Each structure stands twice: as structure tokens, then as C-alpha cells.
Image: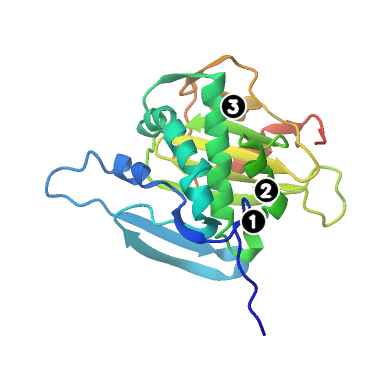
Amino acid sequence: MAQTRSTCKFCGGDGLSDEHIFAKWIGRLLTKDVPPGARYVFRHRSAHPEAGIAGHDKTASLPAYRTRSFCTRCNNGWMSRLEERVRPILEPLILGEPRTLTRSHQETLAFWATKTLLGFQSIDHPTTKWARPEDYAALNEAQAPLPYSQVWLGATDDGGGGWQRAHEIRLHGNASDRIDGFGATLSIGHAVFYLLIGYGGRVGTRLRYQAAFALKEIWPSAREELKWPPAVRLPKLPATGVTELVVRNSITVSRETP
């Protein structure tokens, strides 16, 4: 039986290449203050209790999240240009340095966070893989955050390595088994992103109470300027990320269709 040829999830092209989901500059940044003679080791812990997969560890000198789902043209083209554009904006946030983010900065961060989330989704276990082929194609075409998504940005005092945890979305009033989209926490250094991607259009979630103080919406953004970090910082995050905080302190105010 002939094997199905793999093609780039973003553009559909051939010539897949090995891609670091977190760019090498991020790993070097996280290890830049290591004292002479010391060695910084990233400990990667994988676990999937929902699928009955027990936790296991591996170590690496840099964040070892890799995917072979995108082509050389995308990797060396728009994805590389995005990393160059986001670096001077994201680097201070990773280090926990206060910054004022313009609307353009916020959009660039949301674009990068979405690209990174889709990178993680490309290697996730099948039971937690909710990104659709059209989500990859739409991001490649738009070269901007997905119009049917929402992205928030917060800060944590922890400042640890980088990781991601995704979850499904079932909207209130959905009595069927239908999944209406997915969300994810993306943590890197002191910066914490939370993303929601709806299948039928933007979910239209509004954060309240604790979540509203700790997470600021950067896509779509209503602010010309955003002071970072927020007045309320997130504590050390649990394995589920900020999912529980958002679920307890949010309401769905609209269902915007594409």
C-alpha cells in the first residue's frame, strides 16, 4: 500500500523540515544568567492522564519541543520573519521587565502565540489535538492572529521554562457532544498567554474578577497602549495552566461568526 505523502500544515507544500516550536533564541535567553561552570538543564515532563499515559521525563540543554509538520519555505520564510519581529517585544516579557505594548506589539505577540500553539498542536496526542487543517491554512493566509480567536497576556513571578497545555471548549447551552473550539495556556519565562479558538467564529468570552485583573486581552485589543505586567501577577501555574481561573471568572457575551 502506498504511503500518504506528508505536506506542510500551513501552506500544503512539500519539503518538511525539523522545526523548534520555541526558537533557539528563547532557550539561550532562559539560560543566559547561568554562573560560570554551572549547567542549565531543561527537564521536559510529558503526561496524559486522560489517555492513560503515565508521566515520563527527559532532559535537554534547550527546550526540546520539535515538530516536522512545516516546510522549509514556511520555516525560513514568514515563520522566521515573525520570530525576528517578535523577539524585541517578547524578550523583555520573558525576562519579566516592565514594558508598554502598543497595539502593533499586541497583535504581533498574539500572532506569535497562535503560531506557537499550532506548532504544539501538531505534536499533541490525538486525544488533545483540536486544531483543524483550516486553522493552519487561515493563519498562513492572514499572516495575523486568527479573526475567530481571542488572546490574553499575563505575567507570573515563577519565570520558569516554557510549556503549553490545551483543552476543549463546549459552550453553555450545547447539549450535544459537539466540541465548539479549544483553548490553551502558553507559558514562557514570566509571560503567560491564554488563547481561545472557536470553530463557529469568535467565542466572545469576557473575563471578570480575578481573571480580568491578571489577564489582559491583546487580540482583539481595544487598547492603543497596554502596561505590562498587569497589577495582579499569576502565582506558580498548575499543570492545567490558567484554564480553571478563566472558566470560573468568565462569561460568553457573543458568538461572532467569521
Task: Give the residue at mark 3.
Answer: 218
Query: In this orientation, does residue 94 appear?
Result: yes
Other residues around mark 1 within 10 Å, as few (<14) / some (14–19) / many (≥20): some
How many numbered marks have been drawn onto this rendered protein structure?
3
* Residue 164 x %, y %: 51, 49
Q: Nearer the viewer, mark 2 or mark 3?
A: 2
Q: Amino acid at mark 3?
A: Ile
Task: Give the residue at mark 2.
Answer: 137
Would you identify the image quadrant in which residue 146 lies? top right
Q: CA distance from mark 2 to mark 3?
A: 22 Å
Q: Amino acid at mark 1?
A: Gly
Of 69 and 163, which appears nearest the observer? 69
Q: Is residue 219 above or below residue 9?
A: above
Residue at image point 63% right, 51% down: 11
Residue at image point 46% right, 32% down: 86
Pointer 1 or 3: first along the chain = 1
Residue at image point 77% right, 52% down: 179
* Residue 12 x %, y %: 64, 56
Q: Nearer the viewer, mark 1 or mark 3?
A: 1
Task: Give the residue at mark 1.
Answer: 12
Label 1 near label 2: C-beta < 8 Å? Answer: yes
Q: Nearer the viewer, mark 2 or mark 1?
A: 1
Other residues around mark 3 within 10 Å, as few (<14) / some (14–19) / many (≥20): many
- For the C terminus, give its image quadrant: top right
